[in-house]
Image (spheres, helix red, strand yellow):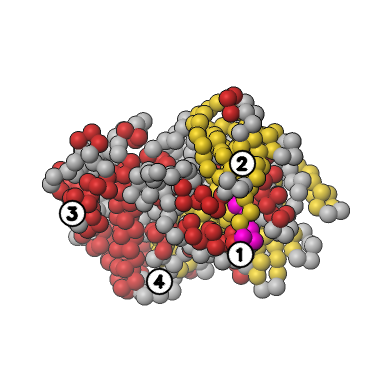
Amino acid sequence: MIAIGMAYYPEHWDRALWEEDARRMAKMGVHLVRMAEFAWSRMEPEDGRFDFGWLDDAIDVVARHGMRVILGTPTNSAPVWLYHDHPETRQCGRDGRPVDVGIRGHRCIVSPTFRRYAERIVEEMARRYAGRPEIAAWQIDNELENSHCTCPACRAAFRGWLREKYGTLDALNRAWGSAVWSGEISDWEQIEPLLAPDCMPDWHNPAFMLDFERFGASRTTDYVLFQRDIIRRYDPQAVVTTNCCFCQHLPDFHSEFAGLSVAAYDNYPPTVLPDDPQALYSNAFALDFIRGFKRQNFWILEQLGGPGGCWSPFGPTTEPGMLAGYAMQAVAHGADLLGFFRWRSCCTGAEMMGHGILDHDDRENRRFREIEALLRRLERMPELDKSALRSPVAILYGADQEFALKNQRQSAKYAYWTQLRLFDEACTGLGVNVDVIEEREPLDGYRVVVVPAHHIIEPTLPERLEAFARAGGTVVLTNRSGVKDKTGNCVFGEPLPTAFRALCGCIVEEYDPIGERRQHVTAGDGARYAVTGWCDLLATEGARVWARYDERFYAGTAAITKNDFGAGHAYYLGAVGEKALYRALMAEILGEQGVPFLSGLPQGVEVTTREGGGKRWRFFFNNTAGGVRFLLGEETVALRPFEMAVQTEKGEWL
Ligand code: GLA
Ligand code: ZN
C-alpha cells in the first residue's frame, strides 16, 4: 500500500481543532502525520527550558485516530533567543557578514555553538520519542542546501578541510594553479571562502570553487549524520531521512542520503505549463533522479497540495486532475509514500497564502475531493509498494559535474541539467524506464548508459564505459566531456573528449559555444533538428557520422557520431538539440539493443512501469494541459489533462 502522509503544524492551530483535524485526516485515508519541523521555539521556549507537553498531546491525538507520526527535527529554524544570545550561530553571506534573522533557515550548520544547541534539542526529542510505536520515521531539518556560509567557523573548517586534503600549501597551490593572477597562498590563514556574486561565479578560479562546493557538500552530509547518530543512539532501528529539494546550492545528494534510511523529496511540479513546446517542465526527471540516490524507491515528504502563494505572488489555482495526476506521477517513478503539503493553509505567518489542501475557510473543497478520490483509487492497488522500476537505461550524474558546470558557465544557453533531462524525457516518452545514477555506481544490468557532459573526468569511468561497450552495451557521451581532471583543471595536450577518444572514435576539432543562436543538424535519414547552446565540430577516427551541421563555415561537419566498439557502440553528441532529436536517437539505440519501446506517444505523455510479486503496473501519464489520444496496440487510449491511466499485466485499466 502506498503510504499517505500529511504535513500538519499543531503549533499553528488552536488545540480545539487538533482532534477534529485528525479525525478528518484519518477518514480521508491519511496514515502518517508529519509534524514538529520548525517548532523549536515551542519545544524550547528559553535556553534549556523544554516543553514537550503540547507535542505529546498532538502525537496522542494522531495515534488515537490510528495514524503514526513522521517527526521532524526543528533545526532549520532556530528560536530567536538563540540567534540573539549567540550571534555566532547565524550564517554569513557572501560578504562575510551575518544574515538578518527574520525568515527561516538562518543557522550555520557548522557553527560549534549551533551544533551544541542542535544536539541538545535533537537529543531531548530522541530521548523522549525514539522507539515509540507512534513514531514511524524521523525527518532531519528541512531542505538542506550545500553550505555556502562564510562565518569564522566555516572559514576555519574550510581551511582544515583543505589542509587535510592537500597536506602542504605547495600541493594546494599546484592543484589550484594559483600562479594565475598572483593567487599563490603562503599561509593557510590567507584562504578566504568568500564567493563572487551570483552574476559572476565564473570570475573565480574554478578549481578553488570546486573544492569550496565539495567542502560545503561534506558539511551538509556531516550535519545529516550528526543528527542521525543522535536519534539512532536512542533507537538503533529508527527510520531516518531528510526532505530534499532542488535548492539554489545543491548538495551532493548521493553522499547526503547514503547514510539515511530512504531518499525523500519535496515534489512541487509546475502549476503553470510553459507555452514553449521545447521547455522541459516535467518533474519526471527529478523523480528518476531521487530514485537514483539509493537506487531504491523513495518518499515524497511534501507533495503539491495546492497552489503556491508564499515567497512570490500567488500561483494560479491547480487545474482539475493536476494534484492527483502529479501525485500519481511520483508513484509511477517509484514513490512509496506521498506526504501532502499541507493539510490546511495557515492563517498566519509568511506562508499564509501557500495553499494547503484546505483553504482558510476549512471547507472540503475541490482539491480535497480530488485527493480523497485519489486515495480511494490507490487503495485499489494495495500491492504497489512491493514493486519497483527496472530500467534498461542509466543516465550518469555527478555532483562534481553540477558544481563545475554551474560555477563556470559554458555558454549562454548551456546547462548541465538540460541534457540530463532531455535524455530522461526521451526515455519516458518511449515508455522505457530510466535510472539516473551516480557516476561511480556499477553499470551491470543496463543496456544503455548515457553520460551527459561528463566534464570532470571520474578516473575509473573511461575504462568502465569501454568495458560496458565492449560487452555489447551502448554508451552515449556528449559535448563538454573529458574537459577537466579531478582538480578541476583542463586536460593538457589531448584533443577532446580526451579519455573517451578511443571509445567514441572521434575528436573535437574545434568548438563553437553558440549561446542562444539556433542552428540545425541533418541526420543520415534526412531528419533535420534544431540545436542550440553548444556545437562541437567533430573529426571522425573510425566513427560514422550520424548527423552533420547545416550552417555557417562548418556546414557538412560531423555533429553526432556513432562508433562500433567491441560488441557495442558509442555515440557522441556534439551539440544540444531539440526534444525530437533525443527521441529519435534513443529509439534507434533501444531498437539496436532489442529493448521494446512504444512509438507514437504524443509529446508530454510519459510511460513507466513498476513490477513486483509477479504483477506489473504500467503508468500512462498525460503531463500536458490538453487531452491526448494514442494507439496502444489495437486499443485507443484517451487521456484528459494530467490524467494517469494504470494498466495491469492482465491488460485491465485500474
Ligand atoms: C518547502 C518547505 C515547506 C514550505 C513549502 C512551501 O518545500 O519545505 O516548509 O515552505 O516549501 O511551498
Ligand atoms: Zn558558518
Q: Main secondary structure of the magenta part?
A: strand
The residue shown at (46%, 43%) is 495
Label 4, label 2: how many angstroms apart (C-alpha)? 50 Å
The quadrant of the image that shows the C terminus is bottom right
* Residues marked 2 and 1 touching at CB (< 8 Å): no
* Mark 4 or mark 3: whose residue is earlier in sequence: 3
The residue that disc 2 covers is 560
The residue that disc 4 covers is 238
The residue shown at (56%, 32%) is 532
* Residues marked 4 and 2 touching at CB (< 8 Å): no
Outermost residue, right side: 634
Residue 464 image offset from top left, x and y in percent: 50, 61
The residue that disc 1 covers is 471
Magenta-highlighted residues: 566-572
* Mark 2 or mark 1: whose residue is earlier in sequence: 1
Query: 634 or 551: which is nearer to us?
Result: 551
User: Does 155 sit left or right of 624 as displayed?
Assistant: left
Residue 168 is labelled as: 3
* Mark 4 or mark 2: whose residue is earlier in sequence: 4
* Mark 1 or mark 3: whose residue is earlier in sequence: 3
Q: Secondary structure at mark 1?
A: loop
What amino acid type should be assigned to the residue bearing mark 1? Ala
* Mark 1 or mark 4: whose residue is earlier in sequence: 4
Residue 65 image offset from top left, x and y in percent: 51, 66
